[in-house]
Image: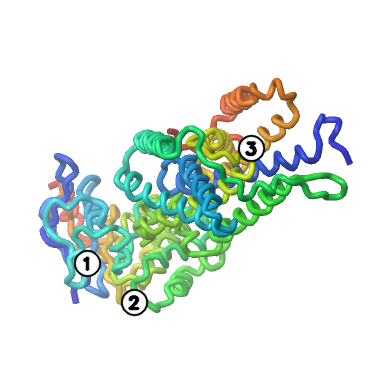
Amino acid sequence: MTLAFLNLSWPVFADAVALGSIYALMAVGIGLVFGVLRLVNFAYGQLMMAGAFALAFGAQWGLPNWESILFCIGVVVALSLVMDRLVFRPLRGHTPAVMLVATFAVAFILQNIALIAFGSFGKTAGGLAYLQEPWDIFGVEIRKIAIVAIVAAAACLAAIQLLLTRTPVGLHMRAASMDFETARMLGVRANRVITGAVVISGILAAVATVMLSVEQTQVTSTFALSDTIYVLMGVVLGGLNRPIPATLGGFSIGFAFGLLGGVLPTNQSQYLPSFIFAAVIVVLLLRPNGLFTRATGAVERL
Amino acid sequence: MTALAVEKLSVRYGAVDAVRGLSLEVEAGQIVGLIGPNGAGKSSTLHAIMGSAPIADGDVLLDGRSLLKRRPEDVARGGIALVPEGRRIFGELTVAENLRLGLAGRRKGSNGDGLARAYELFPILHEFRSRHAGALSGGQQQQLAIGRALAADPAVLLLDEPSLGLAPKIVDVVFEALAQIRDAGLAVLLVEQRAQRTVALADRSYVLANGELRLTLGPDDAGDTDRLVAAYLA
């Protein structure tokens, strides 16, 4: 089978699905925290940047890959918890605008700390670069990272789905994201739910970091910065206050980037973000509640 | 035995006094009514008990222990369950999930089967347990809200206008359930607009106006409309 009529090849398609999967993970991570805190964490990308530096240090210290990955998860989760404790918690109950601006500040602080500490060239996280090599699948050469990213994302999303629908803590999280005040009156512990969401969000950020680091082996202070902006866009596009639409929105943006990036001639791909931004504006003008939500129901605006 | 005691409670929102020096007690196996016109401070009293309204003065005691400065979730887990005004059920969750959410308020070491109790009291909830709660009728949602509160196996049940917006027949169901809950030994504090029915059901009713206690009524006063009206207009 061929996709040639679309000027598209299976490897490009696989890469696009993979990028979509990674963005979907980030979207879930951002969406979980938004659900319980009504906070859009703009500093999500800087969490990932910290995780990428953790991978780079792991490689520099000669750690085996799995140890580097665990180190990355540890650093991202720890930083998420510190961020929650020092910034989000004191601001809890403030308007979404205040919290959003606060996360901007956190993002720039972290980015500049990285710039000062590691310079503008950053460090190299090449431990997983071998995943760039292709696997031959029925005569089509698909990069290993594409398969790994898709499988890892699917596994993470399935695990989160199970957690949210089958466990008490998941039920508490869902209730808290619908009506936190009532949930608390019923005995749902606010701090536990928020910490849970922050930790899971951090784990997802770390997994996405590991995937992105395969391609972006040069880790600098702007690692995952543009990815986060695209994902935030995708989350808004899908519908910010709904987990599944938000995930689909994240996936769509990643998929669109991957696809168009692969299809467009190299001399035009510099315009790619502009195309996507324009498309997002058009979609939001037509469907302000999000692409994947029903038109009814008020959306909490920021 | 006094389960819940409110002592000289004052609730203040900014410059507005919502409740002024209110004292009341609810014993186990009792229904105490709290009635009065809109803005009398009834809901503020319940929210102050739950720890979600600012207490300017006074105290709230559960089994003799002060609940001051406790978070709502800790008050709930201490044994006080609230059926909030407007029911506040989770429409996108199933009936069973709503009830399981009530389990979050169970006290440490509680082994009462609150879910079974809720289903027993409101069989309709069992029948509709896998439906989305938002698809239930208003009366069924009210039963769910009460069932959800009972799932926590609380010692004290607070209800904020459970009959609001319900058809008279459904109000009968709700009030009958409250009588059963009382007989099971819970302390019930019932905030209501339906003054006459509340006075008739409750062991004791307090009339609140402008945040202050105006009158205490017994079940025999339910027929005394003049006294009720006078209390409301005072």
Q: Disc 2 is attached to a residue of which chain?
A: B
Q: Residue at x 64, y 23 (%)?
A: A270
Q: Secondary structure at mark 2?
A: loop
Q: Residue at x 59, y 25 (%)?
A: A277
What residue does disc 1 label?
B219
Is the C terminus of chain A in the top left, top right, bottom left or bottom right quadrant?
Answer: top left
Query: What's under tag 3, amino acid-wise?
Result: Gly
Select label 2 or label 3 by which is in front.
3
List x then y, in percent, for residue B4. 21, 68
What residue does disc 3 label?
A254
Q: Residue at x 20, y 55 (%)?
A: B225
Q: Disc 1 is attached to a residue of which chain?
A: B
Q: Secondary structure at mark 1?
A: helix
Query: What's under tag 2, amino acid-wise?
Result: Ala
Alpha carbon separation for disc pair 1 and 3: 67 Å
Q: Residues within 10 Å of mark 3 (few under 14, many from 20)?
A: many
User: Is residue A220 at least partly visible in the picture?
Assistant: yes
Q: Quadrant of residue A34?
A: top left
Alpha carbon separation for disc pair 2 and 3: 58 Å
List x then y, in percent, for residue A180. 39, 51
Query: What's under tag 1, amino acid-wise?
Result: Pro
Q: Residues within 10 Å of mark 1 (few under 14, many from 20)?
A: some
Q: Residue at x 40, y 78 (%)?
A: B112
What residue does disc 2 label?
B184
Q: Disc 3 is attached to a residue of which chain?
A: A
